[in-house]
Amino acid sequence: MERTVCGIVAAYGDIDPEKCERMLARIHHRGPDDTGRVHLEHAWLGHQRLSIMDVSGGKQPIADDTDSAYVVGNGEIYNHEDIRDVLSEVRFATDSDTESAFRLVLRDGSAALHDLRGMFALAMAHTDGRGAVARDPIGIKPLYWARRDGVTLFASELRAFDPEDQPLVEAFPPGHVWTPGLVGGAGDDYAVGAMVRFADAVPVEVRPARLAPDKQWTEEDLGHIRDVLSDSVRRHMMSDVPVGVFLSGGLDSAIVAAIAAKVAEEKGERLPTFAVGTEGSGDLLAARAVAEYLGTDHHEIVPTAEDLESALDEAVTVIEHFDPALVRSAVPNLLLAREAVEHVKVVLTGEGADELFAGYEYVHSEEFSTPDTLQAELVRSIEMLHELNLQRCDRATMNYGLEARVPFLDATVMREMLAIPAEWKLKIHERTEKQLLREAFDGMVPHDIIWRGKEQFGDGSGAKDVLSALVEKEKAKEGAQDAEHPTVEHGWALRSDEEVAYYRTWHRSFAGVRPDRTLGAFATA
């Protein structure tokens, strides 16, 4: 089965092929293995490919049997085999999971998108003018669009858009599908099109909190958590190229690694793991302990001050964001991705576990001290992931042509873990945060790691002092120390000198982009 992780560009309406080519060239880093495009009368589709499975084949755009309909896609469709069983009458041209989704939509229309399980951004076009553009319900895979007179443009990253188009760029909403209007319709009807939601990030049936049947969970509850997460990790490891795990030294990535190591062992392989930190730091020692316990092929990155400075310098431009917490957390991702891509093309991460199991300290404040308020905040935080942590995770890894997968954000995992009573996730009855998750995997991960507290990168990595000095250097370089904070048009009030420094760096590359339409921000900076 062929899979690709990549960058896509699409345009519908009055096509300027030179503009489309410029846009595609700007995201070449997302898929350095191959470039493809198709230009129809009313549409243009472009694709940068990073091949993950069946690496010798699978060029996109993919066409139907009559070369009248085409698709480009970014991401993974994990139930592609089930789709092919349903479409037994179809003669598939490739082994691509993107084609599985494409053929299902050709048969059933946009409603079929609800049946896709995975992370994806898809753009389809037909010679008769029909088309569709869609993004996965959580927004794991990025997609932006700009609507202007006579044409609607789409791309995987903000940097793809020409400067004159930047003021029109918006984040394409997760779980939505856009379709063009009728060819020959009144005015710009074709390029304007229509958009509808096909799925929610969090299914409606698990949005409200459920009552706990008892004060304490059972061993059966813990077993269910293990089974659901193990099944997700197994699905996310499907690949014809090596798959590794980013080990942060914390609980979530250790759990992913423990499951992944078992899957690799079943295949007669040894799981590659990657960790970053200064020599002797807590994160590095914890990750090393996990790797030794699991018997992984472990790689450590011990950055110098120069390495950290280089990563911090490029973080803002790479992740296309200026939120301080997001920029700082991009530093380890960039260092890890640069090393990991020398060994693997796919990595698993622990993203999403804190949102599902209430791992952040702030959610244990009085504001979220009831099951209902806690559940509401978990749902809200998941719905914001696409413009914060997932954006950082995607850009930092794809900057080096590396795919990051997030097993905790699998649709089944999300549904089952949010169905757990929120009362069990509260820090009451002498519980620590994420006690439910910790107990579920006690024994699969070293005991000290299971009960290790959460630390931010810089604290646990031993890089805090170096990063603090670099932040001061960055503020001085940008003239942000004790300066009057600039006004961000169509954005939020900058909240610290550090954010001012990062914003000025961001503004040089994305001056026309409106933050309020494309980015999110954490509550504090």
Image (cartoon, rainbow, N blue to C red):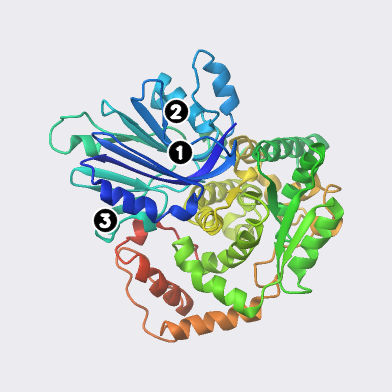
**Numbered tag placed on residue 165 in the rendering:** 3
* Residue drawn 59% across the image and 33% down it: 78
Dot 2 and dot 1 residues touching (CB under 8 Å): yes
Residue 408, horizontal then vertical, whole percent: 64, 44
C-alpha distance separating marks 3 and 2: 29 Å
Residue under label 2: 102
**Numbered tag placed on residue 73 in the rendering:** 1
* Residue drawn 26% across the image and 29% down it: 129
On screen, residue 389 versus residue 255, left or right, reads left
> Which quadrant of the figure has residue 422?
top right
What's the residue type where badge 2 is placed? Phe
Q: Earlier in the sequence, mark 3 or mark 2?
A: 2
Q: Earlier in the sequence, mark 3 or mark 1?
A: 1
Is 284 placed above or below 146 here? Answer: below
> Which quadrant of the figure has residue 52?
top right
Is 492 placed above or below 263 here? Answer: below
C-alpha distance separating marks 3 and 1: 23 Å
* Residue drawn 49% across the image and 64% down it: 523
Quadrant including the N terminus: top right
Mark 2 Cα within 10 Å, few/some/many (few <14, many 20+)?
many
What's the residue type where badge 3 is placed? Asp
Q: Nearer the viewer, residue 247 or 218?
A: 247
Mark 1 Cα within 10 Å, few/some/many (few <14, many 20+)?
many
What's the residue type where badge 1 is placed? Gly
Dot 3 and dot 2 residues touching (CB under 8 Å): no
Q: Nearer the viewer, residue 103 or 367?
A: 103
Is 270 placed above or below 366 here? Answer: above
Q: Nearer the viewer, residue 214 or 350?
A: 350
